[in-house]
Image (cartoon, helix red, strand yellow):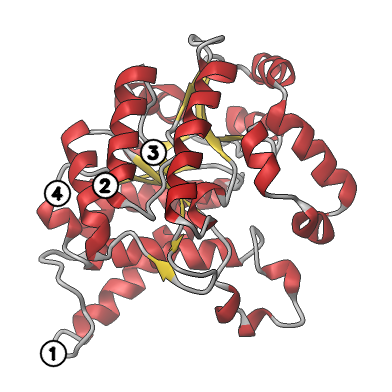
């Protein structure tokens, strides 16, 4: 299929490289793999060539994890987000506006400044929303603030006003909460821990009452929904059984109502036809979008699978292009 649109595609910046290193990922994934990833995160010409080879017309880019979310100092994080969005615009999107779009980086250490920066990036640079790398560190590396918590609602209020999506991207579990992974460090990140952390984060959003307050909010989940299309029916069943218990949150509707009305799912990094069909059966074909997860995954691998997977031509066009084109006004 030609003219596909992808939207979980990562980059880095000179500022980001000055703050973080990939030694941890190198230890887990291999030095050769991460050296190639680090090169591709910065390289624009290679990205465009690979888009052409894979039949991809537009990529919506975002800063690689953990980005602003793990910067402890609030003022440093706010400054980082502004400079990052400036660099993404100057180096990537302004030079190839017909091919490269972007999600804004936001520093939720200050929800007000995050809201202001999102608005600036959307209105000045034409960015398509925000991508948030999971929880935000507040105070120290073992203190997390999740997106459902009250201080963040000031940010969500602006998101609702701007009517743009927020991509909830995975992040490794807090260092203090990794006992179950001891001895199996390969599970902490993308192989397993990402999905568990992000799915739970998304459920918190559903139970918080956020979507009752702001019914037009749109949240995007990658990796075929981080397992939620399969697990959500069980969750809903057990929550119904616990209706007289505590800890059920403030939601006025069933979790499946929020999942079906406030969430979109991408195929990023999850190129499995049975999983795709299960996702479509739970959330509907109009809320599924193609993505690759470049450069951690290959555009060629993603496209080779998607272009031949056993779905109808109409569904392939919707997932591959028109759902994203409609959501992002492309």
The mark lying in front, picked from 2 and 4, is: 2
Q: Earlier in the sequence, mark 1 or mark 4?
A: 4
The mark lying in front, picked from 3 and 1, is: 3
Which residue lies at the image location 55% right of the left edge and 10% below the top edge?
96
Which residue lies at the image location 43% right of the left edge and 31% below the top edge?
319
Asked if residue 58 can be seen in this view, the reply is yes
Q: In the figure, residue 45 lies in which quadrant?
A: top right
Residue 180, numbered label: none
Asked if residue 1 can be seen in this view, the reply is no
Residue 112, numbered label: 2
The mark lying in front, picked from 3 and 4, is: 3
Q: Are marks 1 and 2 in contact (CB under 8 Å)?
A: no
Residue position marked by numbered label 3 in the rendering: 130
The mark lying in front, picked from 2 and 3, is: 2
Compute the Cα span from label 1 to label 2: 37 Å
For numbered disc 4, what is the local secondary structure? loop
Circle 1 residues within 10 Å: few <14, some 14–19, many ≥20: few
Q: Earlier in the sequence, mark 2 or mark 3?
A: 2
Q: Earlier in the sequence, mark 3 or mark 4?
A: 3
In the rendered image, the residue lying farthest to the right is: 32
Image location (x, y in percent) of residue 175: 60, 74
Q: Is residue 13 left or right of residue 155?
A: right
Work out whether residue 225 or residue 330 is closer to the camera in this orientation and state it: 330
Image location (x, y in percent) of residue 97: 49, 11
Image location (x, y in percent) of residue 94: 50, 12
Residue position marked by numbered label 4 in the rendering: 214
Q: Earlier in the sequence, mark 1 or mark 2?
A: 2
Residue position marked by numbered label 1 in the rendering: 244
């Amino acid at each position: 299929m030609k003219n596909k649109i992808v939207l979980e595609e990562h980059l880095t910046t000179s500022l980001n490289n000055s703050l973080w290193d990939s030694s941890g990922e190198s230890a887990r994934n291999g030095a050769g793999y991460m050296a190639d990833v680090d090169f591709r995160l910065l390289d624009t010409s290679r990205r465009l060539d690979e888009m052409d080879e894979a039949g991809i017309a537009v990529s919506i880019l975002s800063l690689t994890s953990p980005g602003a979310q793990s910067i402890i100092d609030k003022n440093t994080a706010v400054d980082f987000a502004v400079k990052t969005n400036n660099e993404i615009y100057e180096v990537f999107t302004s030079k190839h506006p017909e091919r490269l779009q972007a999600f804004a980086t936001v520093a939720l250490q200050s929800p007000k400044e995050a809201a202001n920066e999102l608005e600036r990036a959307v209105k000045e640079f034409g960015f398509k929303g925000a991508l948030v790398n999971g929880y935000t560190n507040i105070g120290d590396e073992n203190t997390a603030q999740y997106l459902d918590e009250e201080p963040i609602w000031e940010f969500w209020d602006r998101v609702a006003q701007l009517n743009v999506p927020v991509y909830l991207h995975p992040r490794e579990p807090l260092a203090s909460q990794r006992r179950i992974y001891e001895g199996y460090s390969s599970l902490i990140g993308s192989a397993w821990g990402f999905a568990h952390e992000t799915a739970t984060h998304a459920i918190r959003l559903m139970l918080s009452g956020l979507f009752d307050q702001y019914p037009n909010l749109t949240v995007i989940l990658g990796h075929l929904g981080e397992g939620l299309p399969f697990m959500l029916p069980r969750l809903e069943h057990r929550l119904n059984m616990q209706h007289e218990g505590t800890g059920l949150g403030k939601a006025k509707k069933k979790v499946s109502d929020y999942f079906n009305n406030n969430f979109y799912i991408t195929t990023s990094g999850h190129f499995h036809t049975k999983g795709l069909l299960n996702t479509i059966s739970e959330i509907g074909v109009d809320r599924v979008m193609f993505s690759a997860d470049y450069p951690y995954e290959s555009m060629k691998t993603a496209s080779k699978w998607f272009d031949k997977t056993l779905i109808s031509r109409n569904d392939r066009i919707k997932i591959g292009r028109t759902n994203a084109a409609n959501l992002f006004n492309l």
